[in-house]
Image (tube, rainbow, N blue to C red):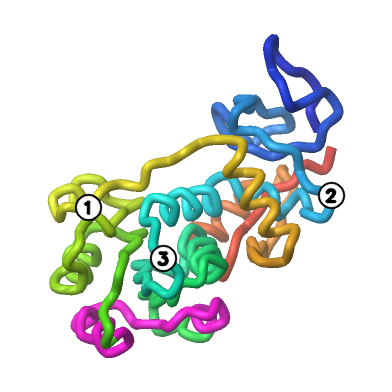
């Protein structure tokens, strides 16, 4: 809930329930948010779900805007099992795209639950992508970078303007693609929240920890086994 606003702020008022991207982190009872990166929370969107949107869902949104693939096109997401990948897969399906995603064998069922064709990463992954998409892929969203990006791009995409990465600016530029260009606007937050409110985008919050247990939450995330978002709440 907004307690104070700065001079010249419009569209947000004291007492509003909001979510957004903080200036210097949010592991605290109070946080400072830029007005342009703050949006009202729709009543049907929980605080926990809203907290996940400014980074993962907004980054996914911006990447897909940048790719600008038409409905019916095929998108390859490298690293679909992570937070941005899960959001990107769902937004891509909203846009009418066919989605193929690389992930570990252990996440196969999880990836399929997103209505995504799973492809196990590792040696031979390019051939497995070709088998999954014999018609070819029209765009690639990379969320891993490094060797995975190099191996999976080679020979799979003729138009490198349809290659964007949120993980490896140097490699994607060398390959002829571009890093994800973040839009960072309130309109983006309003859009992803509206998708959640309409039941089209599931933030997949799997665990919630109170702020005093932040260390345990971080340990859970660093373990790399969470099949969704881990959220901190402020009991106060």
Residue position marked by numbered label 1 in the rendering: 177
Label 2: few (<14), some (14–19) or many (≥20) C-alpha neighbours in 10 Å: few
Magenta range? 110-133
Q: Residue at x 26, y 79 (%)?
A: 136
Q: Residue at x 27, y 50 (%)?
A: 168
Kindly tell me whether residue 226 is visible in this rendering.
no
Sooner in the amino-acid sequence: mark 1 or mark 3: 3
Q: Position of residue 229 (x, y in %)?
A: 60, 60
Q: Nearer the viewer, mark 3 or mark 2?
A: 3
Label 2 with label 1: CB-CB less than 8 Å? no
User: Image check: 122 left or right of 69?
Assistant: left
Residue position marked by numbered label 2 in the rendering: 43
Q: Position of residue 105 (x, y in %)?
A: 40, 84
Q: Measure how far apart labels 3 and 2 are at the Cα level.
A: 32 Å
Sooner in the amino-acid sequence: mark 2 or mark 1: 2
Question: Does 126 lie within the magenta span?
Answer: yes
Frontmost residue, 23 versus 115: 115
Label 3: few (<14), some (14–19) or many (≥20) C-alpha neighbours in 10 Å: few
User: Image check: 212 left or right of 57?
Assistant: right
Q: Secondary structure at mark 2?
A: loop
Q: Nearer the viewer, mark 1 or mark 3?
A: 3
Q: Secondary structure at mark 1?
A: loop
Q: Position of residue 224 (x, y in %)?
A: 48, 65
Q: How many marks?
A: 3
């Amino acid at each position: 809930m907004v307690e104070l606003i700065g001079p010249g702020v419009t569209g947000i008022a004291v007492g509003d329930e909001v979510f957004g991207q903080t200036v210097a982190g949010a592991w605290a009872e109070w946080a400072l948010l830029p007005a342009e990166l703050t949006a009202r929370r729709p009543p049907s969107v929980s605080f926990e779900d809203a907290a996940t949107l400014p980074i993962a869902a907004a980054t996914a949104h911006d990447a897909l805007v940048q790719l600008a693939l038409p409905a019916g096109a095929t998108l390859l997401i490298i690293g679909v099992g992570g937070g941005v990948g899960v959001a990107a897969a769902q937004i891509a399906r909203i846009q009418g795209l066919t989605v193929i995603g690389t992930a570990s064998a252990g996440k196969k069922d999880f990836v399929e639950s997103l209505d995504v064709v799973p492809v196990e990463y590792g040696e031979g992954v390019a051939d497995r992508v070709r088998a999954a998409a014999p018609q070819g892929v029209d765009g690639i969203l990379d969320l891993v970078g490094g060797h995975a990006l190099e191996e999976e791009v080679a020979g799979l995409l003729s138009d490198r303007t349809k290659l964007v990465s949120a993980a490896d600016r140097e490699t994607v530029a060398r390959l002829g693609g571009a890093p994800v260009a973040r839009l960072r606007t309130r309109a983006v937050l309003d859009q992803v929240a509206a998708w959640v409110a309409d039941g089209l985008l599931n933030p997949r919050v799997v665990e919630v920890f109170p702020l005093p247990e932040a260390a345990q939450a971080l340990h859970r995330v660093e373990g790399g086994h969470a099949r969704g978002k881990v959220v901190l709440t402020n009991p106060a």
